[in-house]
Image: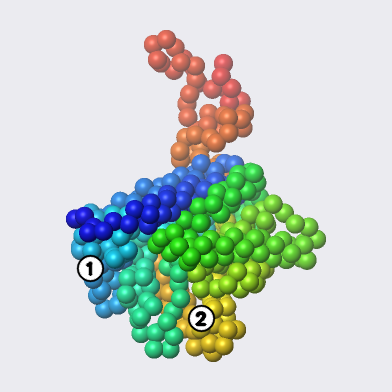
Amino acid sequence: MSLLELDTGATAWLLTSASLVLLMTPALALFYGGMVRARTVLNMMLMAFGAMAVVAIAWTLFGYSIAFGDDIAGLFGNPLQFFGLAGDDSQSVLAGSGVPFLVGAGFQMTFAIISAALISGAIADRVRMRSWLVFVAVWVLVVYAPLAHMVWGGGLLSHDGPFSVIAAPINFAGGTVVHINAGVAALVLALVVGPRIGFGTTPMKPHNLPLVMLGAALLWFGWFGFNAGSAGTADGTAGLAWVNTTVATAAAALGWLAMEKLREGHVTSLGSASGVVAGLVAITPAAADVSPLGAISLGLITGALCALSLRLKYRFGFDDSLDVVGIHLVGGLSGTILIGLYATEGGLLYGGGAALLVVQILVAVVAMLISAALTAVIALAIKYTMGWRVSEREELEGIDVTRHLESAYDLATGHLATLRMRPVGPITTSGQLATAPDAKGTDK
């Protein structure tokens, strides 16, 4: 059905913002792809693109309904209410704003996509693609969509939910739904799947730092759609979110680099890129509810905390390959909890007392418990049915060559590895293999 009064400006703003958020997943593919070793870069990027494909379909069929359908027990929405995104504009998540139903549903779809894709970094280099895609399809419907309903769809953790008797929770653009949720899921998967071969003893350095920097830059660009777009229209709230996103991210990068300098004696491009992402994560739930000065302080604290947290995986022995836990879980918790201090309305430092701080902590803890429990069930079910791990040989030789039969870089080593896996030789005019590679891997 058509809107009685279409707001073309707000609609254009949401369409643009949705496109920016969708860009974040290919940007994440670059960011993660540069951080892994050369032999698995294509697999890592494919995991992000696979998440885009699977979540888009799952969201259209059931995900949006579970997130924004009529409330059931405060936990999820009616899963069939908007099947196939068939809905009236009056039923839009942005009802009354002059934005069509499908625009609001599409905007929310991009949040679900990036949330699932974020998890992939924790299990880099060692999992089967089909297991990952099945996990994504189930996780977005069983974990992400219900938590989105609890926070944004009028459920248990919403602004007017049961915690509001203490203080109304603040989660502007996804601290709990996206980052805490994805960070906890990443931790659970890292524990269930197990560490990479050689974790803790073999150097596993990023193979392409320029790719990492490019990915971080595009993530920062796309994140303006994430935060400023969550205002729903191009207004003063969107402007505040834009400015806060900029300054908090800048401060987090500086906080990370300062911590690197203190601990290691030098700063790194990887630290700069990681600090950028940590700042983006932290400001997401607080973007419209803190001042620019509060955003700077929040960013500095989070950047330093996330840099410090990276050693936890070595201390506790879980292989979070690309530091999803250290950046998204720690950053999401930091941003969500610090709202209780820095919120200009209700924050402890603004004379609001401790009520909001208590509620933000409670909401974060509840979100963690829900995400951990449900993700563990899905991850264990896959482990004992399909299985998660590729073989030891495939992991050591590289998933790109052994599973996808391709190499990211047309170098001699990649060519030789491919030849070892496939009995190829010169092709005759009839299309038949003339000879096989010799023992050295070169064609005769």
The reply to whether discs 2 and 1 touch (Cβ–Cβ < 8 Å) is no
Residue 75 as seen in the image, left or right of residue 189: left
Q: Quadrant of residue 156?
A: bottom left
Residue 331 at x, y percent in the picture: 56, 68
Q: Which mark is residue 345?
A: 2
Q: Which mark is residue 78?
A: 1
State how many labels appear.
Answer: 2
Residue 89 at x, y percent in the picture: 24, 60
Measure the alpha-carbon separation of dots 2 and 1: 34 Å
Residue 361 at x, y percent in the picture: 50, 81
Residue 403 vertical placement versus 113 (above, below): above
Q: Quadrant of residue 61?
A: bottom left
Which amino acid lies under the numbered mark 2 shown in the image of this protein?
Answer: Glu
Q: For the residue labelled by badge 2, is the local secondary structure a helix, a strand or a loop?
A: loop
Residue 389 at x, y percent in the picture: 46, 53
Q: For the residue labelled by badge 1, is the local secondary structure a helix, a strand or a loop?
A: loop
Crowding near the residue tagged with mark 1, few <14, some 14–19, many ≥20 C-alpha atoms within 10 Å? some
Between 180 and 94, the residue placed more toward the observer is: 94
Crowding near the residue tagged with mark 2, few <14, some 14–19, many ≥20 C-alpha atoms within 10 Å? some
